[in-house]
Image (cartoon, rainbow, N blue to C red):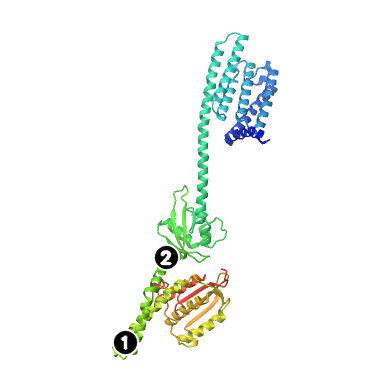
Amino acid sequence: MQLSVEPSVEPIMREADTYSDVHWRSLHYFSLYRFIISMLLFVSALLQPSLFSILRPDSGRFHLIITSGYLLATLIALMWTYRQRLFFNLQLSAQVLIDILIMTMLIHAGGGLRSGLGAMLLVTLAGAGLVGQGRLVSFYAAVATLAVLLEQSYRTMIYDFDATGFFQTGVFSIGFFAVAISARLLARRVIANEELARLRGIELKNQTLISQRVIEEMQDGVLVLNPLGWVKQHNPRAERLLGLSGALECMINEYSQSLAQEFFNWLDHPSTAPILVRAPVSDMTLRVRFVATESSENDVLIFLEDMGRIQEQAQQLKLAALGRLTANIAHEIRNPLSAISHAGELLLEDQHSEVQSRLLRIVLDNAQRLERIVHDVLELGRRDHAHRELIRLRDSLLLFVEEFTFKEKVAADTIQLDFSGEADIAFDRSHFHQVLWNLLANALRHSQRTTGSVRVRVQSARHENQVEIHVLDDGIGVGDRQREQIFEPFFTTQHRGTGLGLFIARELCEANGARLELLGNTPGAHFCITGSFDKCL
């Protein structure tokens, strides 16, 4: 069965695939036009023919028969183009040949080309030229020419010879070919332009999809504003940076008052320099850039960058460099340093003068300082090995403060604890002790060392599933210039410090999903650890 069916099916499928939707749609419009014309002709023959100059009153019955058949034929053709998309050339040829036959009969019944129905053939050939393809258009023009010539010859045989009629027939014949060929050339140009437009549309759609995907996956937030401040578009990253959830298109001041103010300031004084803005909901520090566009509406692009992510990338680069340095330190510095320390301790056991003993003590003190620096740098390599567990702060802090005051040899009431709200945090225990030890040691070093000089306050954070640990002292606080560098590695104000304590503390907090910040002076330094009490976050 398959061998007998496939040869007949394949040509049909190939023929159906040859013509696009544009060709079939054009044929459908052409069939609809023919149906409307046939209906008008039928109505004109059905009513008083004398009302229509194109028909003679003495041929009403003949006109009615012809137009009735023409109306039926055009209706069948119209329905066929709706139901079947096969044999395109056959359908078109059948419709054109029927038109030529019917119009020729009507021309003969109307008294020749003087009746004006020859113009209907011109319209039919023009439509066939726009819809059809190839040499068929010339074939239609040739058939129409033969039809009118035969009609004029038959009229000459019945009536007297009419030179004017033959001249008019010749002019119409030339017009048939001219109209058909011109329509075909025009159709070819239109089809070429339409195909080009279709390909350009596909390319534009693909480019739009790619651009949209790129914008959605950008790490920077993007807003599109008109000069009045109306947000026309934004990507999902902008919603996250601004702390919005499914935000609708609205004015920029509904997104952020500070961002709106900077936008209107930029409109008055355009600049390419980025500015810093704090998001009202997410509380992130954003670097904002305004870029003018050449669109017809003078839209403005706003790029939002998370300064925390930028700083984190910078820290990652810094840590990578420190990691390479750590490997060299472990082998190139620590072993000779141990030898120097050991030799210095052996020399101290001998009797020396006071000057020599002081010099040996300087050597040993600096060797110990270098040892601390090496130890702190090596600790950076352990930040990625965090094993978080839920720490009960009410119990752990009491034991920790007791141990701290004992080892630092300070009064027990120097450090005060205050608990309110949630008192649990998910943290690596060893990391937590090291971070808190660095913060308390720093606070104690700058405090007055009296009762309550150092305060540790635990309270619930503004966001859900988070807790805050505040460490405050009663010292002179942190200056503005020092505030910008206080978390930088190797920055210290103490000649015996390594400058890595606060840097390591912040790195360990980030490794545990927490955040260490320096807040305003109260009146001394005020550090805050914000962490989660959910191990899964």
Q: Quadrant of residue 264?
A: bottom left
Q: Residue furthest top?
A: 160
Decide if residue 344 is on the left or right side of residue 36.
left
Instruction: Identify the residue under disc 2.
Output: 317
Decide if residue 284 is on the left or right side of residue 354.
right
Q: Residue sitting at 47 percent across and 75 percent down?
A: 527
Q: Against 491, is 259 above or below?
A: above
Residue 328 rendering spot, x and y as whole percentages: 38, 71
Q: Quadrant of the C terminus?
A: bottom right
CB under 8 Å between discs 2 and 1:
no
Residue 470 rendering spot, x and y as whole percentages: 50, 77
Q: Against 368, is 168 above or below?
A: above
Q: Nearer the viewer, residue 531 or 416?
A: 531
Residue 38 visible, this orientation: yes
Residue 490 visible, this orientation: no
Q: Earlier in the sequence, mark 2 or mark 1?
A: 2
Q: Quadrant of the N terminus?
A: top right
The amino acid type of the residue labelled 1 equals: Arg
Residue 358, numbered label: 1
Instruction: Estimate the spatial distance between the alpha carbons at disc 2 and disc 1, rounded to whole Å.
Output: 42 Å
